[in-house]
Image: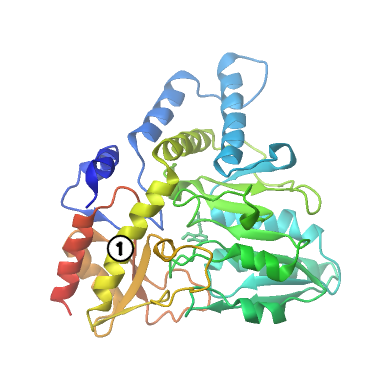
Amino acid sequence: GDGPWQQKLRAQFPIITAHPELAYLDSAATSQKPQAVLDAVQTYLTTSNANAGRGTYPWANRTTELIERARERVKEFLGDREPDRSTVHFTSGTTEGLRTVARDWLVEHLTDGDEILVPFADHRANLEPWLEARRLLAERGTEVRVRALPYQEVSGDYDHRALADAVGPRTRFVAATHVHHVYGGDMNVHRLRAAVGPDVPICLDAAQSVGHLPVKVGDPALDVDFVVFSGHKALALPGTGAVWARNTRGPALVPSGWQGTPNTVGVVSLLAALDWLDAVGVDRVAAHVTRLATRLTDRLRGLDAYEVLGCPASLAADSALPAAQRRHGIVTFRHRGIPSDDLGFVLFSHGFMVRADSLCQAGADDKAGSVRVSLHVYNTDEEIDRLLTVLASLA
Ligand code: PMP
């Protein structure tokens, strides 16, 4: 069961406790916010709201301090052991973060004939910026080649054997995903690094991992150069996100965006969210959602009417992670007879809020669609069991 630990945490989410008849199962789209985050925002707005600026008056100074503290907090949260060699840039989310890396860093670093590896079966936000970078370069007369980072639905990971063939002497950059937003599997970044060698920058779309499981860039197994994530999926306010850049394989990232008033309230909320998550223990959050997702997956597999996408039982036998941790808090499935949007409506009539469409997946078959259940610390065994009862009644 969930136990008192989880019940105490769930009670800290006002929107969840206010609606006991509903079950929010769409945290991969955006997360709910704990009282501590709401309080931090309220305190900031009622004590020191101002534009950032140094040395003029206390509210402005306080705002500047909070933003700087949030930058340091992101580094700490990501286990950065060399904070003097990295930078943190705030964005509105992962989409803007990836675009920033593409436009403000990548295009400055490639020369004619260079190759980049990008994912073609992950979130569209992690494909379009790289294709745009190629277009921008072509306008300047620099031709670069984009090659597919091969994904293997069977293992729930990149195809590391095919990857070896895709990597060549001109490979200069890799865009990858940490946790897949449809299949919920963990990409083995350590093997990706081994395949591309020590010098090629890797940019990680960590939208579904930061705030959900430990993401530690100081760990040699996570030797990446950019970690891009959404604050709003990690318990902070909508319109928040960040890019962490290691800045050791090439010049520092200097973003051209956000030259006006920053989203100070958003940054304050991110600071509070990371504090809250660290106090709770992201590893415990991960264990909780993995347990619920595994329960849902195992039971759905017993119902012939449903097909669970990706991450099958054989999931990444060669993954670095223990089996129990390989599926994160995301389960995507189809009913063999009921279209996904209809199933979404039926589920909401029973109080379940799920995602039901093509899930922004690059190259996805839009007509088929699917239903995604995605979890966070506030979800319970009871919600999963209630959902399974409804799903079983439709089987
Ligand atoms: N990448 C992945 C893997 C995602 O799951 C999402 C959000 N669904 C995004 C990028 C886009 O994030 P945002 O909406 O914060 O820009």
User: Residue 373, relative to residue 209: is it above or below?
Assistant: below
Residue 158 appearing in the image:
yes
Camera-side residue of 367 and 281: 281
Rendering coords of residue 365 (x, y %): 44, 82
User: Residue 272, relative to residue 18: is it above or below?
Assistant: above
Rendering coords of residue 54 (x, y %): 67, 21
Rendering coords of residue 115 (x, y %): 77, 73
Q: Amino acid at mark 1?
A: Val
Report the side of 116 relative to 355 (left or right): right
Quadrant occupied by the C terminus:
bottom left
Q: Measuring 50% from the left and 20% from the top, which residue is drawn there?
A: 48
Report the side of 148 relative to 122 (left or right): right
Camera-side residue of 317 and 186: 317
Report the side of 198 relative to 303 (left or right): right
Q: What is the secondary structure assignment of the residue under circle 1? A: loop
Q: Measuring 79% from the left and 67% from the top, which residue is drawn there?
A: 137
* Image quadrant in which you'd find residue 306: bottom left
Residue position marked by numbered label 1 in the rendering: 354
